[in-house]
């Protein structure tokens, strides 16, 4: 059983706060389960983990084609069928050739819900995950749409990938979500509101829409005054609802955390002037309060919209730290 923890990293110190009372002095052992077995019992051998073969899928999808999330336009929720240019939402596969662990991440680029940073916060992170033998999918969710459409896109993406896990050579129980900025908000919504989506278009909609874990990068997590990114809130809720207190509370991620919220890795730069760092710290505190697994990294340098942050010696460590975290969950 993994220990519940809140890890805050700065350029000068690391603070570890645990919801457990066990000794954390040996960091190498922090994922080791606590044994309740009597010393007189004969230990039972652990089953060998299943190995996955993604080589055929990697070859088949090496051109990163756009895959329709729905087969028919009329099945797409909140699609304007009177507009012939309204396209079926899609997903882009980045299949890792040697993904023997079967893990995958669905990536939501940022852009305030009005545009998408498809390269810096989509394709480049996907390729970086592939280099770590983790499959990725980039989700160009609908922009300039309100929350009903946006939530249906992320939920459908999770269901689509899970339903087609064998096709992609992945484990249906190792489907994570990653989001940057506004995409981080959408990813966080999938971690909390997956039970609210009740579409019944086809067999894909019978699959669970719950991610197995989340990775939130300088995310917009709160829609509350003083913490939110105004454009993100306005676009997500729509002009007529942008000051609706009930919806603001409902779709502020720090308000929706429960003990069943999947594990989350969060990072943010303290000097971020676009999205206050309190978005991440308040969410991490809520995770800790509920006993849910959360690893938080706060960096003293940097700004907003850094992607992999390759040019910042401090902040670029977020990605190898994240990979280490993913590996601890078997990805």
Image: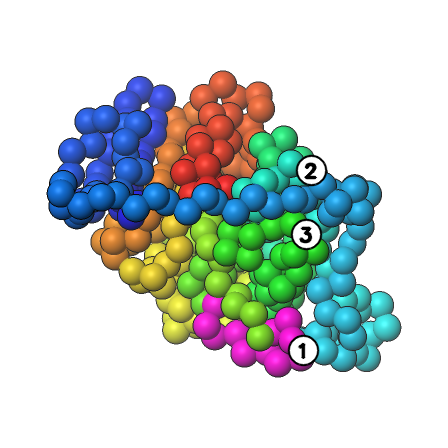
Q: Secondary structure at mark 3?
A: helix
Magenta region: which residues?
A: 194-205
Position of residue 218 in the picture relative to residue 33 (left or right) = right
The label nearer to you, 3 versus 1, is: 3
Residue 208 in the image, given as x and y percentages of width and height: 52, 68
- Disc 2 target residue: 97
Q: Residue at x 69, y 37 (%)?
A: 97
Mark 1 / mark 2, whichever is N-terminal: 2
Q: Residue at x 41, y 38 (%)?
A: 328
C-alpha distance separating marks 3 and 1: 20 Å
C-alpha distance separating marks 1 and 2: 30 Å
Tell me, yes or no, whether the two marked residues, 1 and 2, touch with CB atoms within 8 Å: no
Residue 107 in the image, given as x and y percentages of width and height: 60, 48
Q: Is residue 22 above or below residue 203?
A: above
- Disc 1 target residue: 202
Q: Residue at x 25, y 57 (%)?
A: 290
Mark 2 / mark 3, whichever is N-terminal: 2
Quarter-of-image position of residue 74 = bottom right
């Amino acid at each position: 059983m993994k220990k519940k923890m809140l890890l805050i990293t700065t350029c000068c110190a690391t603070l570890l706060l645990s919801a457990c009372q066990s000794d954390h002095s040996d960091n190498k052992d922090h994922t080791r389960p606590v044994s309740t077995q009597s010393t007189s019992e004969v230990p039972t051998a652990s089953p060998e983990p299943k190995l996955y073969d993604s080589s055929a899928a990697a070859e088949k999808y090496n051109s990163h084609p756009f895959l329709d999330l729905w087969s028919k336009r009329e099945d797409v929720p909140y699609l304007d069928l009177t507009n012939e240019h309204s396209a079926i939402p899609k997903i882009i596969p980045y299949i890792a050739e040697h993904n023997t662990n079967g893990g995958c991440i669905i990536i939501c680029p940022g852009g305030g819900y009005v545009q998408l940073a498809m390269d810096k916060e989509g394709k480049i992170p996907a390729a970086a995950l592939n280099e770590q033998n983790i499959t990725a999918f980039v989700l160009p969710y609908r922009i300039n749409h309100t929350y009903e459409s946006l939530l249906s896109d992320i939920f459908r993406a999770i269901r689509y990938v899970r339903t087609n896990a064998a096709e992609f050579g992945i484990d249906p129980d190792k489907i994570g979500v990653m989001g940057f900025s506004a995409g981080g908000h959408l990813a966080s919504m999938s971690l909390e509101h997956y039970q609210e989506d009740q579409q019944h278009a086809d067999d894909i909609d019978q699959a669970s829409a719950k991610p197995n874990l989340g990775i939130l990068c300088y995310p917009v997590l709160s829609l509350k005054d003083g913490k939110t990114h105004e454009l993100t809130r306005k676009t997500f809720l729509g002009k007529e609802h942008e000051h609706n207190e009930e919806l603001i509370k409902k779709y502020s991620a720090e308000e929706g955390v429960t003990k069943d919220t999947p594990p989350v890795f969060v990072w943010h730069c303290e000097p971020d002037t676009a999205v206050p760092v309190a978005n991440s710290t308040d969410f991490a505190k809520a995770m800790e309060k509920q006993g849910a697994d959360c690893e938080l990294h706060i960096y003293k340098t940097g700004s907003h919209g850094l992607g992999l942050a390759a040019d910042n010696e401090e902040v670029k460590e977020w990605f190898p730290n994240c990979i280490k975290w993913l590996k601890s969950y078997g990805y």
